[in-house]
Image: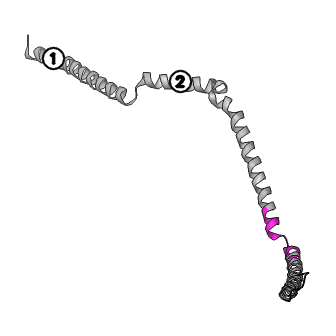
């Protein structure tokens, strides 16, 4: 064998070995990359989540939210009714506060004048009773049989 033939065989062998080594390195890098991708993007977990999301979308009408919607609407209606009642009562309170109390003041003045007149009459009657008592006392002192 000549040197040229040996060199050709060595060259072919080196090329095949280099390709095999390159293939092995590439496979190793791909495996490492897939393991890192699995850590970041767990495909089975993503598929499970997609399935759950699809199930939630399909069964939304049968969920608790659909059963709670009428209750929530009823509560909102009651809140609106309470707010309307509060506004009505507030306006009633404002009306009572704004009522003219002149009529009441007038009645109080009339009653005070009546009380004063009654007091004067009572004082007058009391003074008459006192004078009658004084006259009776004088009659008794004089020995009057009526006293």
Which disc, if any, is residue 52? Answer: 2
Q: Disc 1 vs disc 2: which is toward the camera?
A: 2
- Closer-to-camera residue (41/64): 64
Horizontal arrangement in the rendering, residue 59 relative to residue 121 (left or right) = left
Which of the 4 image quarters holds residue 26?
top left
Residue 10 is inside the magenta segment: no
Give the residue at x 76% y 60%. 90
Looking at the image, tell me whether mark 1 or mark 2 is earlier in sequence order: 1
Q: Is residue 102 above or below residue 70?
A: below
- Marks 1/2 in contact by CB < 8 Å: the verdict is no
Horizontal arrangement in the rendering, residue 28 relative to residue 92 (left or right) = left
Give the residue at x 77% y 57%. 87
Task: Residue 100: give x, y in percent of width and height.
Answer: 85, 73
Q: How is the image coloured?
A: one colour
Assess disc 2: are there few (<14), some (14-19) or many (≥20) residues with their C-alpha within 10 Å of its C-alpha.
Answer: few
- Closer-to-camera residue (48/6): 48
Could you say whether the residue bearing mark 1 is in a helix, strand or loop?
Answer: helix
Could you say whether the residue bearing mark 2 is in a helix, strand or loop?
Answer: helix
Instruction: Tell me the distance, in whole angstroms, between the alpha carbons under discs 1 and 2.
Output: 62 Å
Assess disc 1: are there few (<14), some (14-19) or many (≥20) residues with their C-alpha within 10 Å of its C-alpha.
Answer: few
Furthest-right residue in view? 146
Q: Which residues are magenta?
A: 93-105
Which of the 4 image quarters holds residue 35?
top left
Give the residue at x 43% y 21%. 44
Name the residue beneath numbered marker 1: 8
Q: Is residue 78 above or below residue 91?
A: above
- Closer-to-camera residue (34/96): 96
Which of the 4 image quarters holds residue 66?
top right
């Amino acid at each position: 064998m000549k040197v040229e033939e040996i060199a050709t065989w060595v060259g072919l062998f080196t090329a095949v070995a280099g390709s095999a080594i390159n293939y092995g390195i590439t496979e190793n890098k791909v495996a490492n990359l897939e393991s890192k991708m699995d850590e970041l993007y767990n495909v089975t977990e993503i598929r499970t989540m997609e399935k759950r999301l699809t199930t939630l979308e399909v069964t939304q009408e049968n969920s608790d939210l659909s059963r709670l919607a009428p209750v929530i609407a009823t509560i909102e209606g009651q809140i609106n009714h309470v707010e309307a009642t509060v506004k009505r009562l507030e306006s009633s309170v404002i009306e009572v506060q704004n009522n003219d109390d002149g009529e009441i003041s007038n009645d109080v003045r009339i009653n005070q004048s009546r009380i004063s007149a009654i007091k004067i009459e009572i004082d007058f009657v009391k003074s008459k009773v006192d004078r009658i008592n004084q006259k009776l006392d004088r009659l008794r002192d004089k020995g009057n049989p009526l006293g």
